[in-house]
Structure formats: C-alpha cells, structure tokens
Amino acid sequence: MTNPIIIDTDTCIGCGECVRDCPTKCLAMEDNHAVYAHDRCMECGHCFAICPVAAIDMRDYDTEDVGRFYTMDQIGADDFLAAIKSRRSIRHFKDKKIEEEKIELILEAGRHIQTAKNIQDLKFTLISGNINQIENEMIKAFATHNGDQNNTDRYKNYLFKGAPMVIVISGENEMDAGIATAYLELFVESLGLGALVSGYSHRIIEGSAEVKKLIHMPEGHRVQGVLVVGYPDVTYHRPAPRKPANYELI
C-alpha cells in the first residue's frame, strides 16, 4: 500500500503534535521528526491540519484547495443559537431555480462533512431536471401504499412542495448520513435558501426499487436523508416556542 502521508523532514520541527493527535496511531517520532510508522492510515487529515509549519502533505488529495481555517466559536454562540431557534421547515417554495454557484457550495459543504473512519462514501443525488418524473413515481408508490392508487391527483406537490431541487443523501452508515442531512439543512439557509427534511420521501425511496433505479442509488447504499430545497415563499418573524428540554444529568 502506498504511504498516503508525505512528511517533509527538513521542514518538520519535531513538535510531535501530529503523532499525539493521530487517531490510528500510524505516526511516530524518529530522529526528532515525525515519520509514517504503521500502515493503517484512514486519511482523516488531522496531521495535515495540525502541523504548525505545514510539513505534511497528503497523497492523492488537492491540499491547495482546503480553504481558510475557521472555527465555530468565531461565529459566536449567541448568533448560532439564534439561527438554530429561527430555523423553520419550509413547505412553500418560489418558482425560482437555484443558481449553479450555490449548488456547488452545497456540494463543497457536503464533501467536507465528517464520516466514520473517514470512509467518505456519502452520495449526494441532486434531483432537478427530472424532478417531476421522480416525484410522480414516488406519489404512485405512496398512493398505492395508502390504497389510493386511483386518486393520485390529490397528492400533487405533496412530497416536493414545488421546490426546484431535492437532495437525496445515501450511504452505508446511518449516522454519517444523518449528520450530513443536519449540516446541509443549516448550510442551505446560509445561502438564502430553505429546506424541508422529508421523512415521507425518505421512506418512499427506501421502499421502491423503481425510484432507486431512477436516482441511480449505489449498490449497498441506503437512503438516509432527503432534503427538499429552494427559495422560501413564506416569511417568519420570530422563533417558535418549545417545551422545556427533557434531560437527565447522570
């Protein structure tokens, strides 16, 4: 197996931070600098991110394209909490397409979301051009399940709400895709968009071989999240109230 980590020993200052932080303990200190010692790297990038002198590179990755480093505490807890409280599930969308640059930003956010053991196997299926065909197929399956197959017109826009795009998040690990769904739901709002996590769509796709075929679901993947996305055609003026938190300190 090719060593995925490249260490510039001339630049390395021997601080040992990469060795200490490596989740799989595949790095070690030797002659006062870090070396790749064990063939079990999961390519998480922690060593690349933590090195204070940029002495580490990663083979097969574009490490020039990582962007600026920015931590969540720089956003501010008060603003972030207010945004969480103000978030609403959107069920009314404008007849307006989502710009290509915003779609690219959504995908960029998606590919940087963490996955267990850094497997990076999530697939983001963007339904747009054939959105009506796929929704109609899903409505047929839904109506049939409800014993209402002769009255599918009553389900018009029931699933996708007239939105211009739907993102199906699939993978082998349920937790990974669940995290991705939650992150992307928040991120699309930062773009001026709105989103609805569609539980109905989730269940319909997961139960329909025909719909899975239409959206090119990879073998072994399961639908783990469905985001209906578009420009909101509704305005909210304040956060909604919530019941007290149900918690127990053990």
Image (cartoon, rainbow, N blue to C red):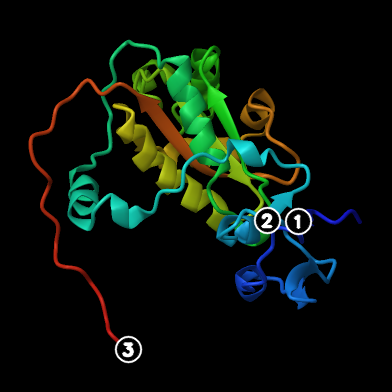
Q: Is residue 207 among what the camera can see?
A: no
Residue 190 badge: none
- Judging from the image, what secondary structure is the residue with disc 3 in? loop
Name the kind of residue labelled 1 in the image: Asp
In the picture as drawn, the residue positioned furthest to the front comes out as 10
- Residue bearing the label numbered 1: 8
Residue placed at 62% from the left, 72% from the top?
A: 15
Q: Is residue 138 among what the camera can see?
A: yes
- Residue bearing the label numbered 2: 55
How far apart are the two marked residues, 1 and 3, measured between alpha carbons? 47 Å
How far apart are the two marked residues, 2 and 1, measured between alpha carbons? 5 Å
How far apart are the two marked residues, 3 and 2, measured between alpha carbons? 43 Å
Circle 3 Cα neighbour tier, 10 Å, few/some/many (<14 / 14–19 / ≥20):
few
Residue placed at 56% from the left, 60% from the top?
A: 52
Residue 250 badge: 3
Examine the image and state in which quarter residue 89 appears: top left
Foreground: 138 or 21? Answer: 21
Circle 2 Cα neighbour tier, 10 Å, few/some/many (<14 / 14–19 / ≥20):
some
In the picture as drawn, the residue positioned furthest to the left comes out as 237
